[in-house]
Amino acid sequence: SPPLGILVPLAEEAEALFALMRQDGATQTRRLGGRDYHSGSLFGRDCVLTLSRVGKVAAATATAGLVHEFGVGAVLNAGVAGGAAASVHVGDIVVGDAMLQHDLDARPIFPRFEVPLTGMSRFAADAVLGASLARATQAFLAEDLPALAPDIRAQFSLASPALHRGLVISGDRFVNGHADVAALRADVPDALAIEMESGAVAQVCHDYGVPFAVLRIISDSADDNAHVDFPRFLGLVASFYSHHIIRRFLQD
Ligand code: ADE
């Protein structure tokens, strides 16, 4: 069967997974368009892991690379995100059911958020992959998270993180202010999480008919403190989350 593409914007978001893949000894790295695609096996599954870098153009290019050059059968986009809804807290996990590009605005020619000439503003993730990611996340929360060092859990208030499923919104902007996140919430009331890639991954996968899934770990609340919370979470927690959730996803 074709390999699974795993697209992660930043190295910190997949450090532990990447280390496992390299330990396997059978990895191959191809450099294309200035980014590395690492092919190998993870928990018995053929995978291609690529660090896309940040933003929609980088994510679209990396997704097209996975589809064209590696023939992936599906794409998993993993990484951190800012919380958009008031009910979504740092340490929570969002499995994206649909993706929207919040900075796409070709009015008055097309409706706000609509991708011109597609008639679509929301791109649905694959239901089977989403259900599998949700199962993996529930098992992670129950069985793996308690093993995270107590001082780190305390530092990030990770007493009882929750899984959410729904809309993830993407744009080429780090959202770093109360007024900014409040405006986005008013514009897209059902948004759960804000990041900078999955809308692009979703659009490219839609164009090629490739199923995809989105896993986002909440690193900050996209508010005035996001620029402090985001790098701290990225450095101390993100890799632990993604490693164990993706392990359980691949073993499902
Ligand atoms: N990724 C993680 N936090 C984010 C934020 N606040 N804005 C955009 N992307 C993010």
Image (cartoon, rainbow, N blue to C red):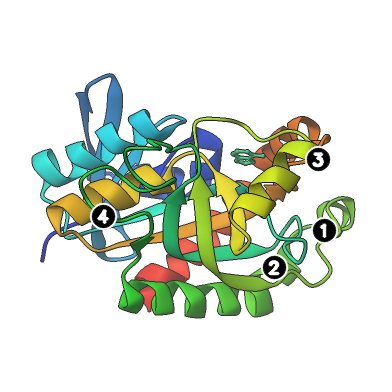
Image coordinates of residue 228 in percent, x first then y, are 79, 32
- The label number, if any, that marks residue 211 in the structure image: none
Q: Tag 2 or tag 3, which sits nearer the N-term?
A: 2
Which residue is under mark 1?
153
Q: Are marks 2 and 1 in contact (CB under 8 Å)?
A: yes
Which numbered tag is attached to residue 145? Answer: 2
Q: In the depicted view, which residue is nearer to us: 111 or 151?
A: 111
- Judged by depth in the image, the label closer to the viewer, 4 or 1, is 4
For marks 2 and 4 on the same chain, the one whose residue lies earlier in the sequence: 4
Judge from the rendering whether residue 71 lies leftward or rightward of residue 225; answer left or right. Answer: left
Q: In whole angstroms, how far apart are the C-alphas of marks 3 and 1?
A: 25 Å
Horizontal and vertical percent position of residue 84 = 68, 54
Query: Disc 3 designates what residue?
Result: 178
**Element on which disc 2 rests:** helix
Cα distance in 3D space between marks 2 and 4: 41 Å
Q: Viewer-nearest of labels 3 and 1? A: 3
Residue 177, above or below 8: above
> Which comes sooner in the sequence, label 2 or label 1?
2
Residue type at mark 1: give it.
Answer: Arg
Amino acid on which the number 4 mark rests in the picture: Gly
Kindly identify the amino acid type of the residue bearing the numbered disc 2: Leu
Dot 3 amino acid type: His
Judging by the rendered image, the residue that carries numbered circle 4 is 119
Residue 161 visible to the viewer? yes
